[in-house]
């Protein structure tokens, strides 16, 4: 990109945070510009997030102090969007929910989507089938967001790997 926005080699789109803000403050992106979507509902949700976030940015209502958390694609995950989070240091400013979208590397059956912060499991959700052509979404609630102490890894775990 000519304006210097950092791009993700896996998605060929801009790297964004949970507000759909790119690596350049005040520039927001969404939809198929960020990554290819299989459903227009995902595009619509991203556009609403980007629009609201851009409005807050222009009004100067974004949290002043944030900590950057990197999201990593773990086992059997091709990529995640967002690729990083800018979490408010003041937990009172934290959002209610956080959606992480991702695609798998292959077809997997009877698995768990697991989200780790460092080595701590903060969310696990069972899925009957996951396909690379279908966007997957894992949502973290406020208490799970509060458990984030470091970088996040999203993995797809097979039944024989599940130890808990």
Image (tube, helix red, strand yellow):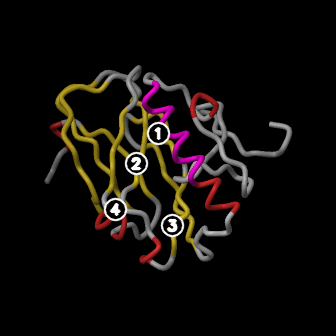
**Separation of disc 4 and disc 1 at Cα?**
30 Å
Q: Secondary structure at mark 3?
A: strand
Q: Which residue is mark 2?
A: 99
Side (left or right) of 107 relative to 35: left
Quadrant (top left, top right, bottom left, bottom right) of the C terminus = bottom left
Percent position (x, y) of residue 104? 39, 30
Mark 1: few, some, or many residues within 10 Å (few <14, many ≥20)?
few
Label 2, label 1: how far apart the Cα atoms are: 10 Å
Q: Residue 109 appears in which quarter of the rendering?
A: top left
Disc 3 to disc 2, C-alpha distance: 13 Å
The label number, if any, that marks residue 119 in the structure image: 4
Which mark is on residue 45?
A: 1
Q: Main secondary structure of the magenta part?
A: helix
Whichever of labels 3 and 2 marks the residue nearer the N terminus, that label is 3
Q: Nearer the viewer, residue 24 or 44?
A: 44
Instruction: Single out the residue that lies furthest toward the right.
Output: 2
Relative to 75, residue 72 above or below: below
- For the residues bearing labels 3 and 2, Cβ distance under 8 angstroms: no
Residue depth check, mark 1 versus mark 3: number of the one nearer the observer: 1
Query: Please, what secondary structure does the residue beneath circle 1 have?
Result: helix
Residue segment shown in magenta: 40-52
Q: Residue at x 72, y 49 (%)?
A: 27
Tell me which residue sits at (51%, 67%) in the image: 87
Identify which residue is drawn at 51% across, 72% down.
88
Q: What whole-number distance in Å separates the C-alpha atoms at marks 4 and 2?
A: 20 Å
């Amino acid at each position: 990109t000519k304006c210097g926005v950092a791009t993700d080699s896996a998605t060929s789109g801009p790297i964004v945070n949970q507000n759909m803000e790119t690596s350049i403050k005040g520039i927001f992106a969404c939809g198929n510009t960020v990554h290819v979507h299989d459903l227009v509902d995902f595009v619509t949700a991203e556009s609403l997030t980007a629009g609201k976030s851009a409005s807050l940015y222009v009004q100067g209502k974004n949290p002043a102090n944030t900590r950057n958390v990197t999201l990593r694609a773990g086992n059997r995950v091709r990529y995640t969007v967002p690729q990083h989070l800018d979490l408010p240091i003041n937990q009172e400013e934290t959002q209610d929910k956080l959606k992480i979208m991702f695609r798998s590397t292959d077809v997997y059956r009877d698995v768990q989507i697991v989200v780790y912060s460092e080595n701590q499991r903060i969310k696990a959700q069972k899925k009957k089938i996951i396909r690379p052509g279908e966007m997957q979404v894992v949502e973290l609630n406020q208490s799970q967001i509060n458990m984030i102490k470091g970088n996040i890894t999203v993995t797809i775990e097979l039944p024989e790997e599940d130890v808990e």
